[in-house]
Image: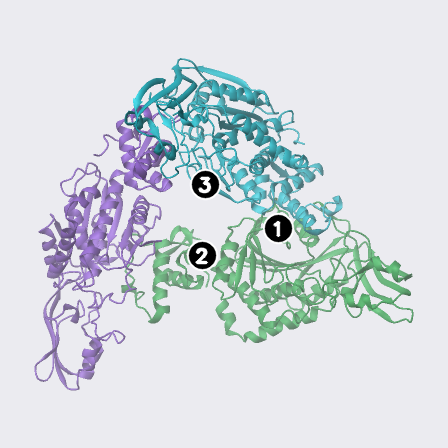
Chain colours: A green, B purple, C cyan
Amino acid sequence: MLGEFEGRDFSSVCEDLHSFAAELYPICRSITGTGIRETLELINTRIPLEITEVPSGTEVFDWTVPKEWNIRDAYIKDASGNRVVDFQRSNLHVVNYSIPVHAAMSLTELEPHLYTLPKQPDLIPYRTSYYKEDWGFCLSHNQKLALTEGRYEVCIDSTLAAGHLSYGECYIAGRSTDEVLISSHCCHPSLANDNLSGLTIAAALARFLSGRDLRYSYRFLFAPGTIGAIAWLARNRDHVACIRHGLVLTGIGDAGGFHYKKSRQGDAEIDLAMAHVLQHSGEFSVTLDFSPYGYDERQYCSPGFNLPVGCLMRSIWGTYPQYHTSADNLEFIRPAQLGASLRVCVAVVDVLEGNRCYQNLSPFCEPQLGKRGLYLSSGGDAGEMAINARLWVLNYSDGKHSLLDIAKRSGLKFQVIRDAADLLFENELLAQFPDDGPSPG
Amino acid sequence: MLGEFEGRDFSSVCEDLHSFAAELYPICRSITGTGIRETLELINTRIPLEITEVPSGTEVFDWTVPKEWNIRDAYIKDASGNRVVDFQRSNLHVVNYSIPVHAAMSLTELEPHLYTLPKQPDLIPYRTSYYKEDWGFCLSHNQKLALTEGRYEVCIDSTLAAGHLSYGECYIAGRSTDEVLISSHCCHPSLANDNLSGLTIAAALARFLSGRDLRYSYRFLFAPGTIGAIAWLARNRDHVACIRHGLVLTGIGDAGGFHYKKSRQGDAEIDLAMAHVLQHSGEFSVTLDFSPYGYDERQYCSPGFNLPVGCLMRSIWGTYPQYHTSADNLEFIRPAQLGASLRVCVAVVDVLEGNRCYQNLSPFCEPQLGKRGLYLSSGGDAGEMAINARLWVLNYSDGKHSLLDIAKRSGLKFQVIRDAADLLFENELLAQFPDDGPSPG
Amino acid sequence: MLGEFEGRDFSSVCEDLHSFAAELYPICRSITGTGIRETLELINTRIPLEITEVPSGTEVFDWTVPKEWNIRDAYIKDASGNRVVDFQRSNLHVVNYSIPVHAAMSLTELEPHLYTLPKQPDLIPYRTSYYKEDWGFCLSHNQKLALTEGRYEVCIDSTLAAGHLSYGECYIAGRSTDEVLISSHCCHPSLANDNLSGLTIAAALARFLSGRDLRYSYRFLFAPGTIGAIAWLARNRDHVACIRHGLVLTGIGDAGGFHYKKSRQGDAEIDLAMAHVLQHSGEFSVTLDFSPYGYDERQYCSPGFNLPVGCLMRSIWGTYPQYHTSADNLEFIRPAQLGASLRVCVAVVDVLEGNRCYQNLSPFCEPQLGKRGLYLSSGGDAGEMAINARLWVLNYSDGKHSLLDIAKRSGLKFQVIRDAADLLFENELLAQFPDDGPSPG
């Protein structure tokens, strides 16, 4: 599929990814509330989304779905009535999940509720207080330094009340009910790389796969981080047995090299596929062992589930200075970077869709490729590589090695190996193993 | 045996290898025909060879034995009657397996039948057309540039007709019917490294092993590449179960370091033995994983057979500029290089012959070597190494580790470990495991 | 326990180790006799020792307990009656186990009985002749060069007669009869690193562990090298099934980096524990594969026993110039070096005592640490590391990974992982697996 994808006007694909991120950027998202609902509605304009609302108070494993949080406005006004900190200018200014407050107070009283980044004095930090009822404002350190003594009017016009937690799913049915899960969180407010990059690429991938003849079914989950994934897992505890491969997409719009964190299994097919794709991508990439902190792979890879779900990032969360600050904005994620990340995702889908085992039907000595016109090089290195690929596929198609195994062993790209397998299959030199119906086109 | 081998006048061994190659060099070999028969006859003057003739048209697995090709003469004459290209000067001048032709034609008509190496303008390339009926001439690029416009008489006095494919086998019976297969191809015309080096060393090794008390039986196969090995395998399909170890010898006369390509199994005893021998040989060497292109290990290691057969080379085919050109001549293979390759082969035979498992009969604590006179160092590093070797053999002779395993683990040479085992066996501190009769001498 | 150990005045611990070595240093030890008995008596003043006397002539596996050797005096007197070589000045002057001799002889007759180190002309070598009845003197090469022609009176006032071989054991009972064996040899005369370092540290470790509530029982064995370990194994052939972990301590007082030689098993828990401790010790260290020469691990790891016993050294025996010479004296082992070695031993005991498997009781998704107050960082890197450690323990506590496995995988120190496990266990998020009673304090 990647080939076809390349045939399209790729720069318009890149621009579209970024413009969708730009559309989503201003919304004040949280783990519950209208912000996440608006986000899911906007995704729904692009791909069909089934939305689930889980009531506050619902127990999901060791957790409880929290009250729903909504916010209309927030500010700090000085004695002259000027909004010196204004939620309308940036939704990062309010500590996410702040309870309502409306009071007058001195700067001294206000100060314990103010959060800044002294080492990055121009940036507004991103802060949350989901599970402890509290309120606060985030502002740049320079902004704070400019505050003078005096009385301030402090207002957070929010509500925290029984409601729902929302998540959306886009299900694309394939020939098999075996599923590939693509998960991205959608609970961060105006932060671009840390969550918009993941969800715009997930949405674009879903749109790209829609209407195709696919081997696997694909489930795209857009849910608030941690509690959303936990709620989904709680409601789909038995269903997860269908998940054959999975990927958490997050932080993949910045300019950093790719970092793929392997599933807890460590040698799942998704791990091998992603390592292969990144190695042949021409991009700088690093493969990391699983660790139990990060994004929602924490939940998918908890020992009770241990699903084959890895996490694709560019720069690693927490290691870049823009992380969880107002500098994680639309300038930080560039169209070409989003596009290259989407290509990696499509390439991995290509591998998952095309990977299978074959049985060489002529396993004693090499079959005579020449008499079938399969030993004639079309010339040049590519031609020789194609012949070598045929020999690799024939030699290792013993029912024990998948095409991906053969690609890895030979050092050749999966697509070259798969093309060879397709040609040998057409020439009746290979059988599918185990015989699982017609080969995908 | 290597020790004994070293006792002989080694330089005369080296010279003999080269002079046999020189004797074989002028013959115009192909995959069938009188050239290969003459070659087998010359080998037969040195070691007893059983020759098999397989009729053209015989089906061997997916292949069919081709018609037999023979050639008497070939030339291109200019208008003055001068042979401007002359088979009598080099048999490389004719595309191997060229069908007969006798015609007059213009240079323009002739040109599609001329093959040169523009980047190596002084060398004649080596070309074949076994399975597509065609004809052609190979010449140096400079020769071709010197051809002027005009009429040429073109003659290839060859025949392509029903006949036979020939191969030869030298079988040296050992105490067991378990076999070591040594295979080299003998189908290339005047090329020295690419096939004469392998077959002269195989013949010398066979002669060296003849008449000895051997643990294994040894089968030396001299056959045309690909179709010869396939024909042999087809006629010996059940017999191959006897093959315990195998080696393809090819391209081992040049000055390059050793390259050993492991069998498809990857950890067969021959793979471990060759890695050990090369590591201790004092020569530069590289061990390569199996790949499904190269020489006849392609057939022996096809997935239906998957025999423990590796391939010993010096420089890797296709990577040196002399490969498949007139520069692969008798100057390119030197006596000392051939000799060093033969020594590696003998050393590997030594390991295969001597490798076995023992059981320590005194496994609780160390046996007291001192009271048996086995703890007295003869002095110096060699003496201390001999004692260490005894301790290694005693400690790891638990029925799970072969002497080769112990050699690898200890970092000591196989021969040192084997000497220690022989001494401990004499002193009744070891039993053979499993008990398989008297220890070899 | 290491923490508590650090709380004490560590330099006094170091000094005490050295002063005990100094107390033991002058004694003329051998594999039997009063020297070893005095040594065991001195150890017995510090820790309770059960002493076993094995009669000469007792068969122990392939060996026989030798006659007992004792010595009162020895000298070489020149014609003027001066003691030119005097046992009273250094017990190294006599070849250990020399039979008695009293004779007058010329220098020429004496010379075959004199041992020197020509390359280290100021040092007295250490020599033994346990199993061959002989006599001799060791002296510095310079001393020997100073000997003039003439008659010498040679006297070795020793006895070699039926007696006993002595060894001592200190047993510290823990909650389980599963044992940790700590073994050090005590048969060398005035050599400091080669045996006093090991036995003083073993004695200090035994004293440190006495009276504690321990998971394992600990057996400290002080025995002559080789024959002592063999005699002990012969008398405890069935008992060794209790040994879960073991360590030979030797040559750990010098200034070299640590060398840990793994048990023959290679992946025993003691091997993983020691590798972990050394890696996090801040000291230079190297882990070596097992080899069948060295100290008494040779016997414990003979194939019939194959016990999980490794060997902790600083510099490797035979590789430092002081080895087996009079330069292996009290200056060569320093208090701080002995102390650091003891700390490594205590740290390993800490790991062995604390290592176990747990089962995460909330394995589906992460448990909500926040509501238990376990997600609040105490701030700084240590606080974040503590939270990460909790996540590592929860994720990998699946009954298949021990705390040590988790420490290795996470890169965190065992103690950090164990603290996390203790906290999670208190919070009822973990169960012991298998359930083996109350967790150690």
**Residue B428 can be seen, yes or no:** yes
Q: Looking at the image, how many numbered discs can be counted on the residues?
A: 3
Q: Name the residue under label 1.
A: A300
What is the quadrant of the N terminus of chain B in the image? top left
Please tell me the numbered disc located at residue A21.
Answer: none
In the image, residue C49 lies at what x, y percent?
Answer: 56, 20
Which residue is at a point 68% across and 69% down the rendered structure image?
A329
Which residue is at a point 47% across and 60% down the rendered structure image?
A354
Q: Which chain carries label 1?
A: A
Identify whether B126 is placed above or below B61: below
**Residue A48 can be seen, yes or no:** no
In the image, residue C309 lies at what x, y percent?
Answer: 48, 32
Q: Which chain carries label 2?
A: A
Report helix, strand or loop for mark 1: helix
Viewer-proximal residue, C50 or A164?
Answer: C50
Q: Mark 3 points at which residue?
A: C288
- Within-10-Å neighbours for mark 1: few <14, some 14–19, many 20+: many
Going from N to C along the chain, the mark reached first, 1 or 2, is: 1
Report helix, strand or loop for mark 2: helix
Q: Mark 2 points at which residue?
A: A404
Q: Which of marks 2 and 3 is in front?
A: 3
Which residue is at a point 56% across and 62% down the rendered structure image?
A258
Find the distance from the CA under tag 1 to the CA under tag 3: 39 Å
Q: Please tell me in which quadrant of the rendered image residue C77 appears.
A: top left
| Tag 1: amino acid | Tyr
- Within-10-Å neighbours for mark 2: few <14, some 14–19, many 20+: many
Q: Which of marks 1 and 3 is in front?
A: 3
Q: Is residue C434 rendered to the left or right of residue C315?
A: right
Report helix, strand or loop for mark 3: strand
Find the distance from the CA under tag 2 to the CA under tag 3: 37 Å
| Tag 3: amino acid | Leu
Q: Please tell me in which quadrant of the rendered image residue A203 appears.
A: bottom right
